[in-house]
Each structure stands twice: as structure tokens, then as C-alpha cells.
Amino acid sequence: MRLLLDANLSPRGIATPLRSAGHDVVALAADPAFEGLDDPLVLELAAGQKRVLVTRNSRDFAPLAREWAEASHHHAGLILIWTLDHSQFSAIVTGIERYVERWPEQEQWRDLVVAF
């Protein structure tokens, strides 16, 4: 699965195990060029690269996803993490993997928004 981790998720604690499981993962926090990127641009980046965006910033991205849906603007999928602290690496990885197992094809994620 092609994933984009928002800046609030650890490249080492989350991206590394996902890569080890065979996923193609880009972590914004690992690249200083993405520092301070506004949320709409993060979603555009994920959509442009056909990557499912994973974020703990549900407060901002849930309404943004709704705006995109209302405007018929498509994205490549969104995983919102509501309940876990950013340091709960293993639980976050497990949650992501659970959804990827449920929808294993990249195309199945188009405009899909899930949360845990």
C-alpha cells in the first residue's frame, strides 16, 4: 500500500515497521522540505501521489475530507487516528495494517475515510 504519514507521526516508530511489512511509505516528518506544510496541501500531496494519508490531526482533516467530498474533489484515502497517542507506535501500526487488510487494493481507498 502507498501511504503518506502526516508530520505528527514518527518516521522511525511507524514508517519503518510499515515499510518492513512491504508498504511504500513516505513520512513528512523525515523530510525538512515538508515542515509546516498546510493541511490542504498535505491532502493534495497525498492525492497527487496516490497515497493514503495517515494522520492524528483528525480535528482538521475530517472537515477537510468532507469539504473535498462536497466539492467532488477526489483523494486517495484517509486514515484518521482519534484515540491513540503519537507514541503508541505498535497500536498505530496495527490499526493501519487492520484497515489495509480490509481494503488491500490501492483503488479501494479512493475517497475512503476511516478512523480508529
Image: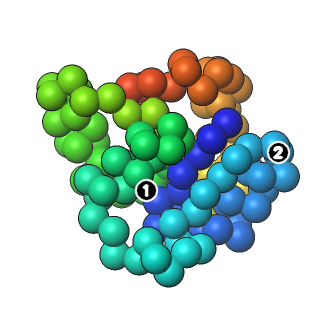
**Which residue sits furthest front?**
48
- When asked about the image quadrant of residue 96, the answer is top right
Give above or below for 61 relative to 72.
below
**Which residue sits furthest bottom?**
32
Badges 1 and 2: C-beta atoms under 8 Å apart? no
Disc 1 marks a residue whose amino acid type is Arg
Give above or below for 71 relative to 55.
above
The residue at the point 47 percent across, 67 percent down is: 7
Image quadrant holding the N terminus, namely top right
Label 1: which secondary element: loop
Circle nearer the viewer, 1 or 2: 2
Q: Position of residue 102 (x, y in %)?
A: 64, 21
Q: Which residue is mark 2?
A: 21
The residue at the point 74 percent across, 50 percent down is: 18
Q: Which residue is mark 1?
A: 56
Q: Which mark is residue 73?
A: none
Q: Is residue 85 rendered to the left or right of residue 48? A: right
Q: Is residue 111 rendered to the left or right of residue 66? A: right
- When asked about the image quadrant of residue 23, the answer is top right
Label 2: which secondary element: loop
